[in-house]
C-alpha cells in the first residue's frame, strides 16, 4: 500500500478517477483531503431511554444546520450524526481513511467513533459520528473543516 501525495490526489481528481464534489483545491493537504461539514444532522432518539441496535435506527427525521454563522450547538456529552459537504467517489484500487482534525480534538470534539475506513469503490457523502467529550458547548456550522481523508493504493 502507498499513501497518495497532494500531487497525486490533485491529478486523480483532475482526471476524474477520484471524485470529490464540490472540489476546492485549497482543501488538498500534503497527504490528505480536508472535508467540510454538510447541512444534515441526525440526533438519536430512544424509546423509553433505550436504543435497540438492529431493531430500530434510533434516529428520527434529520434536522439541518442553518447557513447562518450561529449554526448548531453540540452540548457537553451530546452525540449526533452528520454528513460531509463533499461527496466522495473512490475507484476500486484505492481505499480511504477518515480522521478528525486535531484542532477539533483539542476542544473535545470526536469526529468518528468506529467508521473511519472507506471501502474501495465507495461513492457518497460520509456519515460522521460527532461526540462532545469536553466540558463546554461546541458550535457546528456548514462548511467548517470537520476532518480529512487520506488515500492509499491497493
Image (spheres, rainbow, N blue to C red):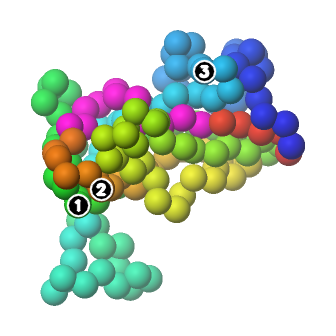
**Mark 3 or mark 2, which is nearer to you?**
2
For the residues bearing labels 3 and 2, Cβ distance under 8 angstroms: no
Q: Nearer the viewer, residue 57 or 154?
A: 154
Measured Cα–Cα span from mark 1 to mark 3:
31 Å
Q: Which residue is mark 2?
A: 133
Q: Nearer the viewer, residue 132 or 14?
A: 132
Element under label 2? loop
Say which residue label 3 marks: 29
Instruction: Provide residue 95's location: percent of width, then percent of height.
Output: 73, 45
Task: Answer left or right for 3 relative to 73.
Answer: right
Q: Secondary structure at mark 3?
A: strand
Q: Quadrant of the N terminus?
A: top right
Q: Where does label 1 land, which residue?
A: 77
Circles 1, 2 touching at the beta carbon (< 8 Å): yes
Residue count near mark 3 (Cα–Cα under 10 Å), binned few <14, some 14–19, many ≥20: some
Pick the residue in front: 12 or 139: 139
Q: Quadrant of residue 131?
A: bottom left
Q: Which residues are magenta?
A: 139-149
Q: CA distance from mark 3 to mark 2?
A: 27 Å
Q: Position of residue 151 (x, y in %)?
A: 71, 37
Residue located at (23% from left, 59% from top):
78
Marking on residue 97: none
- State the CA–CA distance, disc 1 to disc 2: 6 Å
Q: Earlier in the sequence, mark 3 or mark 2?
A: 3
Residue drawn at point x = 17 percent, y = 47 percent: 136
x, y percent for residue 94: 78, 41
Amino acid at each position: 500500500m502507498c499513501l497518495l501525495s497532494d500531487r497525486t490526489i490533485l491529478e486523480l481528481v483532475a482526471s476524474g478517477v477520484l471524485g470529490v464534489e464540490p472540489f476546492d483545491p485549497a482543501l488538498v493537504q500534503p497527504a490528505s483531503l480536508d472535508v467540510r461539514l454538510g447541512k444534515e444532522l441526525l440526533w438519536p432518539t430512544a424509546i423509553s431511554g433505550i436504543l435497540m441496535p438492529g431493531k430500530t435506527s434510533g434516529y428520527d427525521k434529520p434536522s439541518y444546520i442553518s447557513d447562518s454563522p450561529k449554526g448548531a450547538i453540540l452540548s457537553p456529552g451530546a452525540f449526533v450524526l452528520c454528513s460531509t459537504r463533499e461527496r466522495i467517489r473512490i475507484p476500486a484500487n484505492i481505499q480511504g481513511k477518515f480522521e478528525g482534525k486535531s484542532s477539533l480534538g483539542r476542544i473535545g470534539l470526536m469526529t468518528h467513533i468506529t467508521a473511519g475506513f472507506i471501502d474501495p469503490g465507495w461513492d457518497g457523502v460520509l456519515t460522521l459520528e460527532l461526540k462532545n467529550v469536553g466540558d463546554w458547548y461546541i458550535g457546528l456550522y456548514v462548511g467548517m473543516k470537520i476532518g480529512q481523508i487520506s488515500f492509499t493504493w491497493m
